[in-house]
Amino acid sequence: MARIRQFENRVVTLVDDNEIAGVCHEYSGQEAVAVGICGALTTSDIVTSTHRGHGHTLAKGGDVGRMFAELLARTGGYNKGRGGSMHIADVGIGIF
């Protein structure tokens, strides 16, 4: 849960500094939901999230660096920086 909160705190700072373009829906305050749900899943289980999917991706083992790259519209992101906050996906860990 702390990892998700730390990530979200940094996201809020980047949004406030206008470094993240577009809409970014924060996950703060919901960390226990993602940890509880994803903790009960197997590696083969799939999660489809909504516009607040950061926590689910991190709880399923998502890469923080790739997530930041996606939010910052960099090619190293999950969708090569084109999907942004609401479209992070990683088939390898079951995040659609």
Image (cartoon, rainbow, N blue to C red):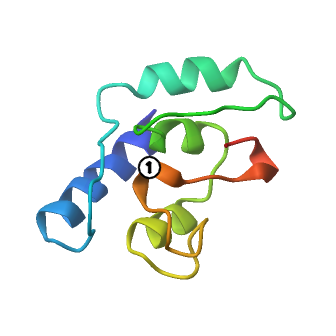
Q: Amino acid at mark 1?
A: Met
In the displayed image of the protein, which residue is found farthest to the bottom?
A: 75
**Where does residue 6 sit, x and y in percent of width and height?**
35, 48
For image coordinates 51% across by 61% down, the residue present is: 67
**Where does residue 36 sit, x and y in percent of width and height?**
57, 17
Label 1, on which residue? 86
Residue nearest the viewer, comparing 53 with 28: 53
**Where does residue 25 sit, x and y in percent of width and height?**
30, 44
Quadrant of image for the C terminus = top right
In which image quadrant can residue 46 be found? top right
In the displayed image of the protein, which residue is found farthest to the right?
A: 44
Bin the neighbour count of mark 1 within 10 Å (Cα to Cα): few under 14, some 14-19, many 20 and up.
some
Mark 1 element type: helix
Residue nearest the viewer, comparing 39 with 2: 39
Q: Is residue 6 above or below residue 14?
A: above
For residue 72, side relative to residue 64 (left or right): left
Q: Is residue 83 above or below residue 45?
A: below
Q: Is residue 70 above or below residue 3?
A: below
For image coordinates 65% across by 26% down, the residue present is: 38
Q: Is residue 4 above or below residue 62?
A: above
For image coordinates 35% across by 36% down, the residue present is: 27
